[in-house]
Amino acid sequence: MAGSGGRKPQDINADARLAAIVDSSFDAIIGKDLNSIVTNWNLAAERMFGYSAEEIIGKSILMLIPEHLWSEETDIIARIRRGERLASFETVRRRKDGPLVAVSLTISPIKNRNDEIIGASTIARDITAAKESERRIRLLMREVNHRVKNQFAVILSMIRETSKRSTHPGEFEELIRQRIMALSRSHDLLVTSEWAGASLFDLIQEHLKPFGHEERISLSGPLLTLQSNAVQNLGMAFHELGTNSSKYGALASEGGHIEITWAVETGPSAERKFHLVWHETSTAAGAAGPARKGFGTVVLQRVAPQSLSGSSSLERSPGLVKWSLTTPLEAIIVPQLGTEGDFSV
């Protein structure tokens, strides 16, 4: 006599293997009849929805479906009765403890030995992480779109102002190239952090690196994470200051030094202010740069402070360049981030 109920041993072994596969699956596998009553429930379904097999087998699958989606189950059963297989579609289901979970469902008819449809098999995959990733990508794309439009406006302004102050096409081309490359350096820092901001220390280093002579530069101040607008505008300012220094100041002659300091200060009305000072000394007679007002001066005196809702001062004299900037702290730092310590280099 063959196995139990006249079944062959190989059939029983096949059923055991199938049951093992179902129980070890990472996806929830749920069986239900044509009245939407749960008949099968694997361990992954228990992990995903919080119900044990004893709690849910024999109960309606509607326990998992938010009320506003009950019509979805009616449509599923109608299509299963017609013998249709429902390809993967995304929806939400409710856990035992209440929260909704995003799932991808694939539903197929279950047939008996007489080829009659007696229920449905549902494979549910938790796609919460994938949906969150999609949400973050959409946010990043919106931010990138905003940033790109903003940079187009900045580049147009650069072209206009640089053309006014260039003496010949070659000078104009070189200055525009350098300034767009400076914007690119700020952009790279933001991309690396997925537009979450960049540290002020990294920003200064990145913009002064092309000029060399790091030993002549000292930085001192609290660790701050700058928001994207501050990264762009302070980056432009550091590029212009570095360019001037490499041509006429501390980075062009021996004996020069640049000291960059910043601090968070409290004003008379308890408002928090960001204060930065670029103090450059040099033995070069032309350290202050050319007498004519160039695009760099416009950036330092107007563009950077106005973009950051602050004010600035620029002092130039033989052997000295001093630029100071004061802005509201909230215009500079990423919300909920601020001083995390101090450093000096």
Image: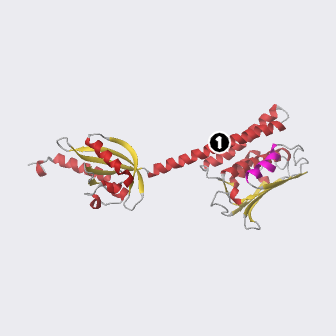
User: Would residue 65 be found to the left or right of residue 262 on screen?
Assistant: left
Amino acid type indicated by mark 1 = Val
Of residues 216 and 220, the one nearer the viewer is 220
First to last magenta residue range: 295-308
Q: What is the magenta segment's predominant secondary structure? A: helix
Q: Camera-side residue: 106 or 211?
A: 106
Instruction: For the C terminus, give its image quadrant.
Output: bottom right
Q: Percent from the top left, x then y, of residue 75?
A: 32, 45
Task: Decide whether residue 239 is among the magenta residues.
Answer: no
Q: Which residue is denoted by mark 1 in the rendering?
A: 148
Which residue occupies the foreground of this view, 218 or 128? 128
Q: Is residue 4 above or below residue 85?
A: below
- Residue 305 colored in magenta in the image: yes
Q: Is residue 165 left or right of residue 147?
A: right
Q: Position of residue 141 (x, y in %)?
A: 57, 44
Q: Quick check: 185 left or right of 141?
A: right
Farthest residue, direction top? 169
Q: Label 1, secondary structure: give it.
A: helix
Q: Is residue 345 visible?
A: no
In this rendering, does residue 201 appear at all?
A: yes
Q: Residue at left 46%, top 48%?
A: 130
